[in-house]
Amino acid sequence: MIYEIKSSANNNSNSLFHSNGEFFYWNKKRFKKLEIEDYVYVVNNHSNYVLFTKVDAKSIAVNYDNVKNISSFEDKNQDFTVSGEWDDFVRLKIISKNEIPVNWKWKSLGSSETTYLNGESININAATNRMLNIKQLKELSSDTEYQNVLENCAKNFSLENSTKTKEKIIVKKNNMSNSDDILTAIQTKPFILLAGISGTGKSRLVRELAFKTCNNANLREDNNKPGNYELIPVKPNWHDSSELIGYISRINGEKYIATPFIKFIAKAWSFPKTPFFLCLDEMNLAPVEQYFAEYLSIIETRTSKNGIVISDAILDMESIGENNFATLLEEIGVKNEGDTENLYSQFMKNGIQIPNNLIVMGTVNMDETTYSFSRKVLDRAMTIEMNNIDLSSGLDIENNELSYPSEYISFDSIIGNKTIGAEVYGEFDKSEDVLIYLKDLNKILDGSPFKIAYRVRDEFLIYVSHNENKSGVFNQALDILTSMKVLSRIEGDETKVKQILEDLLDFFEKKDFKMSLSKVQEMLNRLEYGYTSFWS
């Protein structure tokens, strides 16, 4: 392993040499995967030395003085004191201490302090950088043992091993396949982007969810299309919201032209205990920020009151005029009489708001005919990848047809009632663990436009809280949401993202994240062509 001492830890490092010159000590946290006799190269570019060492002891107990904020321990008849609170220390036996020459250039490990050169934890995808580190270390000593260890480690990053691993990376993708994960994403934020190559069943998934949640018999009159489902194909010429939200026509008098989107919203209000699914098919054939601008703004006004989420109006009488608005309500079937009288009064008073039970799911393809997403859109959406393909599945006609189930997905398991992190922070016992994770992640993203802010923090807290209620795995929830909310925003050329991706690779490796690790590996592979992003 290589351990790189950062500038912030340099002062402590000077006090952690044994007076006999045979041992060096460091906090155990970064050495947990190592065993006694494992080799460690300790690089201190600030004090101009590289230690060639072996792990000699793994758990030296520490006493912490919280008044003085110092940690102390005793070993080999010597007392050691360092500032700050630390866990147990390891003892490294110094084989040689090698001075760094003036002109020596070290390829830093970035925000990570460690990297492995041998064993299961090596990052073969960073082979180029590790081979450069090995080459640089070899320049410092001609000692046989020192050189032999590095030569053996270099074999782990050979072209043959690197190529084989990259082939595996391209084939193996970890996507969300658990239905609970998808339901939890919707429960957290009812605006979903379904990403993947054409023909992977993205539109079908939305329709299938509508079938499985159509709990009202009045919505089940059509066996081919549930009443809580609407598909709207996006057209390439949509550059404003008129095709989606409607517009005022002045042909033969002034009138507001209703759209399937507005009609579907009104219908959802009439069935408040049934989830309603709107599928925007081929969503990015037109620029989303333009034709969906009103929705992107309104979704951020969602607030929870008495367990029900409400929002500002997407359309009201002030925006189109009282007469136009009243006529519009008549046209979409909301009349000032009968079953819709209360809804008519609500719309006239508050406007047409986004109902709590409306779920917008957009299918996304990335090719030369489509638009990319701005961070404004990605910040507001949950991104789910659907690139897993099994060509043997879906060939059974009986199982291939969608139908209403005997038992429906419960309303509460798919429709959430939390909109800000503060609503779960006090009642969720792992809230602090989530925040610690996000702070560690932000250290890697520091100085980039990809840093995590309050909106993403809140969604992490809400998602992981819902996941916990479904008896999900905490670490897996962090992994899934990191891919959905953090990696989906990262894009750029080598100078902008390479170091960040390599640092994230090491970070996810240590966290044992499957999905995020696979995605970062894929993004690094694509960086060879000069540019990379989440979207394949």
Image (cartoon, rainbow, N blue to C red):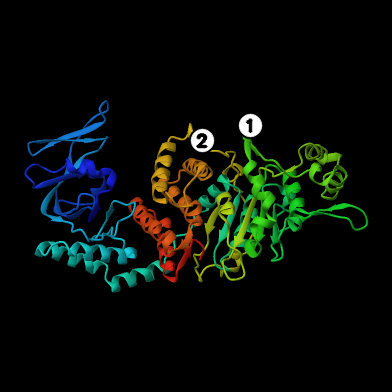
Q: In the rendering, which numbered label is found on residue 306?
A: 1
Residue 252 in the image: x percent, y percent? 93, 57
Does 424 appear above or below 145? above
Q: Is residue 214 visible?
A: no
Residue 265 in the image: x percent, y percent? 73, 48
Q: Residue furthest front?
A: 102
Looking at numbered disc 1 in the image, what kind of residue is underneath it? Answer: Asn
When asked about the image quadrant of residue 304, the answer is: top right
Residue 69 in the image: x percent, y percent? 26, 30
Q: Residues within 10 Å of mark 2 (few under 14, many from 20)?
A: some
Q: Which residue is mark 2?
A: 424
Front position in the image: 343 or 408 = 343
Quadrant (top left/top right/bottom left/bottom right) for the N terminus: bottom left
Residue at (77, 41) in percent of width and height: 351
Residue at (26, 48) in percent of width and height: 30
Q: Residue furthest bottom?
A: 160
Left or right: 372 as drawn, with respect to 73:
right
Looking at numbered disc 2 in the image, what kind of residue is underneath it? Answer: Val
Left or right: 69 as drawn, with respect to 191:
left
Residue at (78, 43) in percent of width and height: 316
Q: Which element type, helix, strand or loop, lies under badge 1?
A: loop
